[in-house]
Amino acid sequence: MFELGNNLFPTAKMKFEDFDIRFTLRGSTRMGSACYSERKLWFHPEVMKRNPEKYMQTVIHEVAHLYQRKLYPYSQPHGREWKR
């Protein structure tokens, strides 16, 4: 995901190794979460096991948030910059 993001947004390059990735989300409301300032990504381990396709969509979604936050630090989480 970061390779694609780096190609799309060359001024906001990031590396997978720069982020702490955790599989500790629980409950049914969120499948993933991202925090650029803390350099962390969280994922729901049960989703990964039950539905790998949905899991990959979640990974893409959360990595998009990291690029959005780096490029547009004051934009809304699902605003027009993120959708772009």
Image: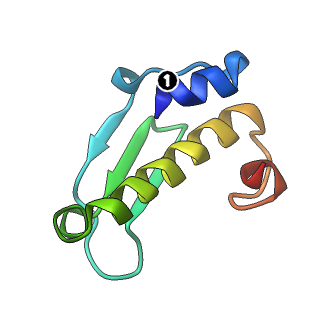
Q: Quadrant of residue 67?
A: top right
Instruction: Describe residue 18's horizontal placement relative to residue 26 as left or right.
Output: right
Residue type at tag 1: Glu
Up/down of 14 relative to 76, above or below: above
Instruction: Describe residue 42's horizontal placement relative to residue 3 as left or right.
Output: left
Instruction: Describe residue 64's horizontal placement relative to residue 70 as left or right.
Output: left
Question: Which residue is more in the foreground, 33 or 58?
Answer: 58
* Residue picked out by circle 1: 3
Q: Position of residue 37 (x, y in %)?
A: 54, 37
Up/down of 45 relative to 30, above or below: above
Residue appearing at x 46%, y 38% in the figure: 38
Residue appearing at x 68%, y 27% in the figure: 8
Instruction: Describe residue 69's horizontal placement relative to residue 50 as left or right.
Output: right
What secondary structure is marked by label 1?
helix
Mark 1, Cα crowd under 10 Å, few <14 / some 14-19 / many 20+, is few
The figure's colour scheme reads rainbow
Q: Position of residue 58 (x, y in %)?
A: 43, 58
Q: Position of residue 7 (x, y in %)?
A: 62, 21
